Amino acid sequence: MTSSKDPMSIVLSGDYRFSKRTDVYLTGSFTQNRGGSALSANGYDGSVIAGANQFGAVVVLHHNF
């Protein structure tokens, strides 16, 4: 059995240290749904309309006390 669904997902992430105790973590994801696929930025969770694209981003500022 073959499927015409053809999703593509790209994820970029990075971490930047401001000092010994403080850093910021960034991640971004873009998902292009082709052929009626319904892949979301965090997997197949059912929240995306088939064929709709999705973008997600997370920014975390982390400080150790």
Image: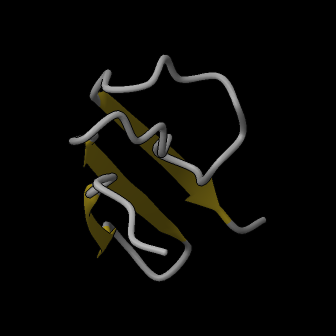
Between 18 and 13, the one nearer to me in the picture: 13
User: Is residue 42 shown left or right of residue 22?
Assistant: right
Which residue, as the protein is rendered here, is positioned at the far bottom? Answer: 20
- The residue at the point 71 percent across, 68 percent down is 64
Model colouring: secondary structure
Between 10 and 53, the one nearer to me in the picture: 53
Between 52 and 11, the one nearer to me in the picture: 52
User: Is residue 8 shown left or right of residue 60?
Assistant: left
Asked if residue 24 is positioned above or below residue 16 in the image, the reply reads above
Asked if residue 52 is positioned above or below residue 5 in the image, the reply reads above
For the C terminus, give its image quadrant. bottom right
- The residue at the point 30 percent across, 68 percent down is 13
Between 36 and 26, the one nearer to me in the picture: 36
Which residue, as the protein is rendered here, is positioned at the far front? Answer: 1
Q: Where does the image place residue 6, in percent across and percent down from the top left?
A: 26, 57
Which residue, as the protein is rendered here, is positioned at the far right? Answer: 65
- The residue at the point 38 percent across, 61 percent down is 3
Q: Where does the image place residue 24, in percent across and percent down from the top left?
A: 41, 58
Q: Where does the image place residue 28, in percent across and percent down from the top left?
A: 31, 50
Asked if residue 22 is positioned above or below residue 52 in the image, the reply reads below
Asked if residue 19 is positioned above or below residue 65 in the image, the reply reads below
Q: How many marks?
A: 0
- The residue at the point 47 percent across, 82 percent down is 20
Q: Where does the image place residue 62, in percent across and percent down from the top left?
A: 59, 57
